[in-house]
Amino acid sequence: MRGGGRGPRGKGPRGRVPGGRGPRSGPGGMKGGNKVIVTPHRHEGVFIGKGKDEVILTKNLVPGESVYNEKRISVQNEDGTKVEYRVWNPFRSKLAAAIFGGLDDIWIKPGAKVLYLGAASGTSVSHVSDIVGPEGCVYAVEFSPRSGRDLVNMAKKRRNVVPIIEDARHPAKYRMLVSMVDVIFADVAQPDQARIVGLNASFFLKAGGHYMISIKAKCIDATMPAETVFSNEVKKLQADELKPAEQITLEPYERDHACVVGGYRMPKKQKTATAS
Amino acid sequence: MLLLFETPGGFAIFKVLDEGKLSNVEDLGNVFSSAESARKMVKLKAFDKFDNTSEALEAVAKLVEGTPSKGLRKFLKANCKDETLAVADSKLGNIIKEKLTIDCIHNNAVMELLRGVRSQLSELISGLGEQDLAPMSLGLSHSLARYKLKFSSDKVDTMIIQAIGLLDDLDKELNTYAMRVREWYGWHFPELAKIISDNILYAKSVKLMGNRINAAKLDFSEILADEVEAELKEASVISMGTEVSDLDLIHIRELCDQVLSLAEYRAQLYDYLKSRMNTIAPNLTALVGELVGARLISHSGSLLNLSKQPGSTVQILGAEKALFRALKTKHNTPKYGLIFHASVVGQAGGKNKPRIARSLAAKAALSIRCDALGDAGDNSMGVENRLKLEARLRSLEGKDLGRLAGSAKGKPKIEVYNKDKKMGSGGLITPAKVRLLSLQPLVLSAIVTYLYCCFVQTYNTAADSLLVQTPASAEDGVKEKKEKKKKKKKKAEAEEEEEAKSEESSKKKKKKAKTEVEFEVEEPAKKEKKKKRKHEEEETEEPAKKKEKKEKKKKKSEA
């Protein structure tokens, strides 16, 4: 009887045994057994792993499991408990690329409620779910059935992800599933994405809430130069009460991509009375 | 004015208390910033809870399409007499208006109201706190997602993986227990172990007999064959085993019962596995069989994972240790893994086994993709592929037979010795003839016409001299080798075929005993002769001309 099924044995990553004493492993030059020092990032819920290379990590909500075969790092605390972190690949996730790029504030923090538009197979969503932790909630919207299937499978393991297989253009269709959220993250790659985000914000984003949009210039208009596309998008957002606060480019991880972060229905700042 | 609000727990109707504020849409948002002011604005009038998840799923699914479900309609009829209803979806509003004659409105003010209510939901609906809503929302979203993705519980491949794992475990356990019975009872009646080799029969006999003294009196005809029974009865008399007490025999009998029930359950499990495999992966089952198919799925982890693998991987799934060892030491990689146990591969022999394994793996990969990602639930594709494979196996074996049977004239052709020529099996037989047997007539005619279109030449008497036997065949061999290297096998075959044909036609051969296979090829060859009598001479020209060119090339390369 050749090779009975003793669990999924693939020809993929081999020798990737997690757990055990001491920190180890990582992407880009890191191999098993390397020492990695884990420190908290400026953003709450994100961590930095310093080995030969620097990587960003999120604390694994489901220890012992990889969502998309990413590397995991196990660290033993002083009191003997083990904590597992998952490596966040900026080449695969726009959010990770934005963090690497140096955003001031991502607004996604432990306990937050996030509406994630364009969830795809759930690779980035899993990291957001790690950050918000068990108190927070991630409403992941994805229209494609193929990716949706992977998303639902991922959501079965993580109880703070609510999978929604609907078109993000019609938030009315999933209004019974979503409560008011603190942050909207949009990675939909559609020409009318500003309108989509505006519509979803009017339904679900709380006043004073924030949004993050990843804009792909080629997707909006392939003929115009990227800068023009970005400024046009920002204007459209402003028209929908989505006030942009910062914009960064996602180079070197993505070409002609930008990430715009801003607030929705921000309360008007009281002008301090100047002493006359 | 009333407001319809949908929650994961049920439908809520709110009464708008202060309709004056609706005119100022901007400030409406501020009204809901605190619970107190929110309560002054709207009040919960009625709440219709979903009774169970299936009702919730149905109601929400209908809502997504924009139609009200029965429960919603009843609820609205009961609570919305003579009032306008504010709804979130204008399409829904239209249908409500039509069916229930309740006026519905949908505008910016309504949207703001809904926003406000949503933000203060737990305050406005007293029985529904945050912690209640969250799991309801999660459950509902999963049900809805499953409904959308047309999840069917029949098609879950986890069952297969678990079933095959259990089957393997059962086999091991069964074997262990059976060995234990043999050993234990062997104290009392050692000869029985050698007489009855099958585990199940052994257990049955022990159960029936108990103490070996009873063997002579009892009838074993249902369990054993007559000679075995006779042997047993003989041996029981002269056995050299020790005596055992009744209590010990009771326990041995219990163990036998266990063995028998396990064996029965294993049979049932196998049937279950077969039926599941036919439901989940009918094409794969038709191609390789239930057991091999189940092992492949279990090895990959899921049907979807298996469908992502290319055919070459499917071929050597299960032989990873040998594969990576061979890759590291730069040796030959294994030719088959789990696929070795498929019946088609078992039927093939010798050199054809790896060939069939590769073809089977390729077709299996296609069938798996059809099962995992396609919609059709029948096994038509798998059956078709299996027929193709069996035909290929027959043709491969036919080729071998032809090679072994010898050449056209009934005796092997003697060739001029060429030390550089690589010989396959049957070195004395001209390979040209072999390929003659395997080429399809249609392909042949196609190539002939193509070649004719390429070289239209006049008949050259001088070229006839090249059609002499021995030098031609020598060139045959060398040319063959070179063309093999160029990977233009078919063309080479066609050319040689033509040479062979032209040789035949020019030689005016005498009819001698021929093999069956050659008859088939003779007929199309003859047909072509009839069709293209005019071009025959030109045909003989082409290979001749080509041979000349190649001779010159060879001489140049050698020089």
Image (cartoon, rainbow, N blue to C red):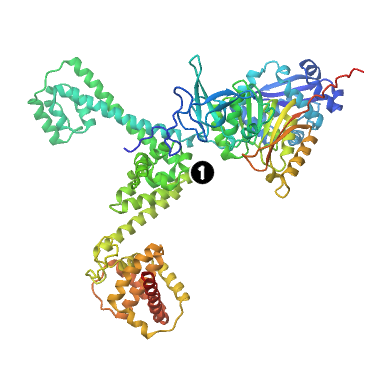
What chain is tagged by disc 1? Answer: B
Q: At x 15% / y 26%, what residue is drawn?
A: B218
The one nearer the camera, B545 or B163, is: B545
The one nearer the camera, A92 or B376, is: A92
Query: Type of residue at label 1?
Result: Leu
Image quadrant of residue B245? top left
Residue on which the image places disc 1: B373
Q: How many marks?
A: 1
The one nearer the camera, A107 or B15, is: A107
SS label for mark 1: helix
Residue B401, percent across and down?
A: 27, 61
The one nearer the camera, B385 or B432, is: B432
Q: At x 12% / y 28%, what residue is drawn?
A: B191
Residue B150, percent across and down?
A: 56, 37
Height in image: A165 above or below B336? above
Height in image: B510 above or below B191? below
Image quadrant of residue A184? top right
- Answer left or right for B425 relative to A109: left
Q: At x 73% / y 48%, what residue is drawn?
A: A224
